Image (cartoon, grey):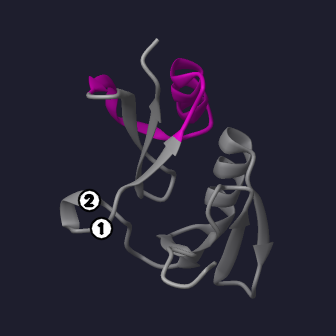
Amino acid sequence: MKSNKINYVELPARDLSLNKTFFSQVFGWGFKDYGTEYTAFENAGLDGGFFQADFCSRPQTGAALIILFSDNLEATLEKVKYCGGTIEQVIFEFPGGRRFHFLDPCGNEWAVWGELS
């Protein structure tokens, strides 16, 4: 049942092409363009998209933090850095696991968590 469930998420991106390349290389997402100012992402665990905008999504300004999961946190962190992301918080432990925060190439903040080793 889809009713009353989170179904879609939209995020800003200063450069749609740059974010599409980053997320396809790091996380294996696919994309479907809807014009020149919107792209939907696929294979991300939740449907959503990026819209062209001159601002970014950061929890410090009241935005929700989207958290991804990884079976290999260290490898994902290195891939984020290699593909142009910026590490905002290095790997740290929290009750139930470990995670790090990063900024995508357009400045949106994300987190990736993994289970304790």
In the image shown, does 28 or 6 lie closer to the viewer? 6
Q: Is residue 25 magenta?
A: no
Q: Secondary structure at mark 1?
A: loop
**Which residue is tagged 1?**
63
The residue shown at (46%, 24%) is 115
The residue shown at (59%, 21%) is 75
Are the residues flagged by discs 1 and 2 in contact, CB closer than 8 Å? yes
Residue 11, image x and y in percent? Answer: 49, 71
Asked which quadrant contains residue 17, the reply is: bottom right
Separation of residues labelled 1 and 2 (CA atoms): 5 Å
Q: Is residue 3 left or right of residue 95?
A: right
Note whether 82 is above or below 112 in the view shown: above
Give the quadrant of the N terminus. Answer: bottom right
In the image shown, does 109 or 13 lie closer to the viewer? 109
Note whether 24 is above or below 26 in the view shown: below
**Which residue is tagged 2?**
59
Residue stretch in magenta: 69-94
